[in-house]
Image (cartoon, rainbow, N blue to C red):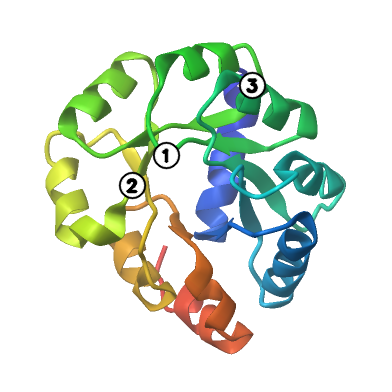
């Protein structure tokens, strides 16, 4: 993996603070959702591969310098390669499959595998990953991430799954590098999102 480029993407995600997880029923719906999120001030987008033609959506934003667009819910090698070819700036999986990480290690793209348990974190760490998606974070709560930070102080977590936008500052202040938020962003206004992000001291 090209560490310099992938780490610069990590820094950009950290600056964005919030990653919008776009899971749509069609390509058109996905593009419309991204348009609305962009108007609200969201700058980091994760297009899930459960969305039809996700790779086409990602490719359409390759030259949009106002957005960081990546691929999410990558569970197979074929999807990982498709995401690379589409120009994904980062790639996220719900879990950790070493073969996907090995394949992506030959590409200059930030890969964020998903973990939940200490054993999964240890395996991902042993294979060189220090930025991990903690999923599903909302079901386990903020205290769970804090407990994991004790034995794994060098790991940077991106908690995702069931987190409400209003709680984003709490996760960031607890040490999350960024926070993934899904469908609840649709009901948040631009003013509400800006209030959430500006309330966070970084």
Q: Which residue is mark 3?
A: 78
Relative vertical location of residue 115 with respect to residue 17 in this rendering, above or below: above
Relative vertical location of residue 60 with respect to residue 180 in this rendering, above or below: above
Name the secondary structure under disc 2.
loop
Earlier residue among tags 1 and 2: 1
Residue 94 image label: 1
Mark 1–mark 2 distance (CA, rounded to whole Å)? 7 Å
Task: Residue at 71% x, 27% y: name it.
Answer: 82
Q: Which residue is mark 2?
A: 135
Residue 92 spot, x, y in % from top left: 51, 38
Q: Are marks 2 and 3 in contact (CB under 8 Å)?
A: no
Query: Hey, which quadrant is residue 201 in on the image?
Result: bottom left
Quarter of the rendering occupied by the C terminus: bottom left
Query: Hey, which quadrant is residue 163 in on the image?
Result: bottom left
Earlier residue among tags 2 and 3: 3
Task: Residue at 50% x, 84% y: name it.
Answer: 195
Mark 2–mark 3 distance (CA, rounded to whole Å)? 22 Å
Residue 60 spot, x, y in % from top left: 85, 48
């Amino acid at each position: 993996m090209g560490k310099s480029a992938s780490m610069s993407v990590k820094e950009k995600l950290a600056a964005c603070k919030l990653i919008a997880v776009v899971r749509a029923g069609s390509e058109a719906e996905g593009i419309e959702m991204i348009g609305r999120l962009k108007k609200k001030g969201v700058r980091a987008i994760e297009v899930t591969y459960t969305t039809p033609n996700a790779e086409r959506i990602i490719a359409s934003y390759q030259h949009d310098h106002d957005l960081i667009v990546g691929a999410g819910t990558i569970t197979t090698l074929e999807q990982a390669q498709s995401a690379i070819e589409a120009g994904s700036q980062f790639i996220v999986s719900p879990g950790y499959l070493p073969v996907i990480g090995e394949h992506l290690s030959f590409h200059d793209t930030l890969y964020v595998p998903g973990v939940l348990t200490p054993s999964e974190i240890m395996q991902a760490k042993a294979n060189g990953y220090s930025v991990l998606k903690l999923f599903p974070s909302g079901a386990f709560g903020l205290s769970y991430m804090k407990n994991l930070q004790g034995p794994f102080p060098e790991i940077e977590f991106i908690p995702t799954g069931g987190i409400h936008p209003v709680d984003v500052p709490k996760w960031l202040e607890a040490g999350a590098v960024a926070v993934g938020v899904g469908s609840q962003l649709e009901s948040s206004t631009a003013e509400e999102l800006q209030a959430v992000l500006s309330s966070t001291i970084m």
